[in-house]
Image: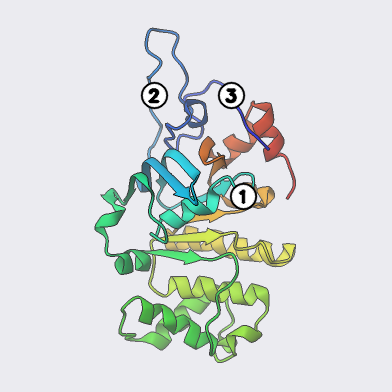
């Protein structure tokens, strides 16, 4: 689906949680009736940004997949990235722990350039859960301890940390010595979440974590994600094609199309107050 010139109802801001200057209509910036059209309305009760993207562009195989992205992503929220296939959602996610680097623009993590962090240190703070669960040879315990080794951690109190991570991911500790590739799909995804939690991250990036799960298992995994965000003050940024999941689970939503942000703000506002017919048609689709 192709979006064009999204329009929003007049308001002080669309949700008041994100700054998106890529598209003034998407960010809640309304053209003034005076001489200047560059006025940005103040956002109420601003929260510190986990990430700030400034003019970020990405090119793959000669194709522009992200085009001048500018947005703040609030700390401590669940942020859903949605949009048609090929919109740039996963490409954006991969930039946030430097699986890839942009060709232009700047990314700030906690107000510092993301390139100022050693990659290994960054990835201890910004975990990544892939669409298809990654299971290493060996037991669940072995899979979780991999995170410590890859993170340069010497593994002090490793068994305690394994138990804590499994509890946070709501993974039965009785599975600790089970061979990882013999678990169900839902259990394997929880192993991946637990592994990401082993380094006590500040941010969890999730690329369509429920795409291969049945609806009931997906709902339980999202409930776990909501609890983790709330109790651990964890910022979660997730790509999803399941719009109902984004609406139920996220605090904020960013809608991408052709590598550009066409809407962003608090999830309820994005889904309920969008007036552009093309964007509304997409947001009301069932995936």
Disc 2 residue crowd, few under 14, some 14–19, many 20+, Cα 10 Å: some
Label 2 – label 3 distance at C-alpha:
16 Å
Disc 1 residue crowd, few under 14, some 14–19, many 20+, Cα 10 Å: many
Under circle 2, the secondary element is loop
In this rendered view, identify the residue nearer to me: 215 or 84.
84
Q: With respect to residue 191, does 178 lie above or below? A: below
Report the side of 184 relative to 105 (left or right).
right
At 27% from the left edge and 60% from the top edge, which residue is drawn?
117
Q: Quadrant of residue 6?
A: top right
Q: With respect to residue 32, does 27 lie above or below? A: below
**Residue 185, horizontal then vertical, whole percent:** 66, 74
- Can the viewer see residue 264 in this picture? no
**Residue 227, horizontal then vertical, whole percent:** 53, 62
Instruction: Give the total number of marks visible in the rendering.
Output: 3
Q: Earlier in the sequence, mark 1 or mark 2?
A: 2
Label 3 – label 1 distance at C-alpha:
21 Å
**Residue 12, horizontal then vertical, whole percent:** 47, 24
Residue under circle 1? 246
* Closer mark to the observer between disc 3 and disc 1: 3
Under circle 1, the secondary element is helix
At 37% from the left edge and 12% from the top edge, which residue is drawn?
36
Under circle 3, the secondary element is loop
Residue under circle 3? 7
- Marks 2/3 in contact by CB < 8 Å: the verdict is no
Residue under circle 2? 40
Quadrant including the N terminus: top right
Q: Earlier in the sequence, mark 3 or mark 1?
A: 3
């Amino acid at each position: 689906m192709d979006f064009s010139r999204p329009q929003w109802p007049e308001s002080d801001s669309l949700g008041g949680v994100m700054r998106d200057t890529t598209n003034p209509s998407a960010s809640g910036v309304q053209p003034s009736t005076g001489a200047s059209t560059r006025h940005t309305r103040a956002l109420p009760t601003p929260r510190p940004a986990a990430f700030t993207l400034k003019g970020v562009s990405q090119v793959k195989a000669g194709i522009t997949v992200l085009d001048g992205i500018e947005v703040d992503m609030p700390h401590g929220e669940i942020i859903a990235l949605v949009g048609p296939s090929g919109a740039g959602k996963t490409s954006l996610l991969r930039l946030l722990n430097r699986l890839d680097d942009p060709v232009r623009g700047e990314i700030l993590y906690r107000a510092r350039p993301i390139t100022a962090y050693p990659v290994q240190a960054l990835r201890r703070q910004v975990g990544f859960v892939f669409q298809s669960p990654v299971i290493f040879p060996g037991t669940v315990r072995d899979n979780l301890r991999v995170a410590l080794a890859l993170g340069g951690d010497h593994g002090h109190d490793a068994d305690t940390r394994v138990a804590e991570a499994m509890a946070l991911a709501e993974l039965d500790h009785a599975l600790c010595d089970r061979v990882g590739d013999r678990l169900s799909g839902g259990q394997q995804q929880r192993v991946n979440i637990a592994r990401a939690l082993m380094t006590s991250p500040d941010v969890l990036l999730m690329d369509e974590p429920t795409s291969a799960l049945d609806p009931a298992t997906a709902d339980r995994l999202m409930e776990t994600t909501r609890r983790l965000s709330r109790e651990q003050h964890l910022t979660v940024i997730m790509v999803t094609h399941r719009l109902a999941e984004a609406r139920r689970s996220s605090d904020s939503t960013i809608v991408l199309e052709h590598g550009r942000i066409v809407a962003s703000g608090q999830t309820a506002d994005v889904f309920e107050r969008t007036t552009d017919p093309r964007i509304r048609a997409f947001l009301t689709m069932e995936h």
